[in-house]
Amino acid sequence: MTEEKKKEKLKTLDMVYIGLSAALIAICSWISIPMAVPITLQTMGICLISSLFGMKRGTLATVVYIILGAVGVPVFQGFTSGVSIIAGSTGGYIIGFIFTALIVGFVSDKWKGKLIPLIISMVIGILVCYAFGTAWFAVVYARENTPATIGTILGWCVIPFLIPDAVKIVIASILTNRLKRFVK
């Protein structure tokens, strides 16, 4: 096989992985527990795909997922879609997914999927998503309601998610460890 055909095949494989990964994130978003900010499996899906496929594929899959939702494909939590969801109070978490994918994917590429660096990157990635999403939530909430204190907002948007996200990180790490050898 010529070098040009290998590159072409890799591009096709990239598109397949990115498309399937965007679909996985959508499926993970549909599994949710409703709260002020719903508990979903999106962060687990993003950590998993970014650790398996690296920064380029993981981030592109996350961006494709967000674009699909923005143009009307019901891929967000509760089978919702539209720019209004992204502009709403939980939209910052959706945008924060990109940062999570970048962080986890970068570490996966740099440390070749070693478990401890991946777990640390997942923790950092989700914390960055929390920071971005919570700040966004506070701004949007203050525009629509009486401003809430930081403690109240953390009680709505971060504290209830610490244990579920820790469990999701463990599951994503285990799945990455088991599946990494099957990914080209």
Image (tube, grey):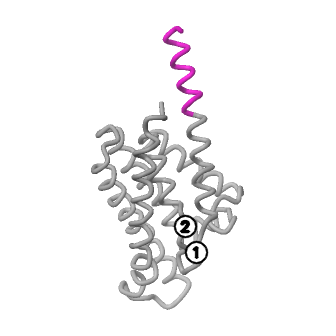
Q: Name the side, left or right, on which 71 lies relative to 125.
A: right
The stretch of residues the image draws in magenta is: 1-14
Assign a secondary structure to mark 1: strand
Q: How many marks?
A: 2
Crowd band around label 1 with a 10 angstrom C-alpha radius: few (<14), some (14–19), many (20+) = few
Is residue 33 at all visible to an observer of this figure?
yes
Kindly check if marks 1 and 2 are in contact, taking CB atoms under 8 A apart as contact: yes
In the image, is residue 184 part of the stretch drawn in magenta? no
Residue, far bottom: 146
**Measured from the top left, where is residue 155 in percent x and y?**
41, 84
Assign a secondary structure to mark 2: strand
- Residue shown at the point (45%, 88%) measured from the top left: 147
Q: Is residue 75 above or below residue 85?
A: above
- Residue 87 sits in quarter: bottom right
Q: What amino acid is at disc 2?
A: Thr
Q: Earlier in the sequence, mark 1 or mark 2?
A: 1
In the image, is residue 13 part of the stretch drawn in magenta? yes
Instruction: Compute the Cα span from label 1 to label 2.
Output: 7 Å
Is residue 135 at all visible to an observer of this figure?
no
User: What residue is disc 2 on?
Assistant: 40
- Residue shown at the point (56%, 40%) measured from the top left: 18
**Measured from the top left, where is residue 161 in percent x and y?**
44, 74
- Residue shown at the point (52%, 13%) measured from the top left: 4
Q: What amino acid is at disc 1?
A: Ile
Of 105 and 164, nearer the camera is: 164
**Measured from the top left, where is residue 10 in percent x and y?**
53, 25
**Measured from the top left, where is residue 20 in percent x and y?**
61, 43
User: What residue is disc 1 on?
Assistant: 33
Q: Is residue 184 above or below residue 87?
A: above
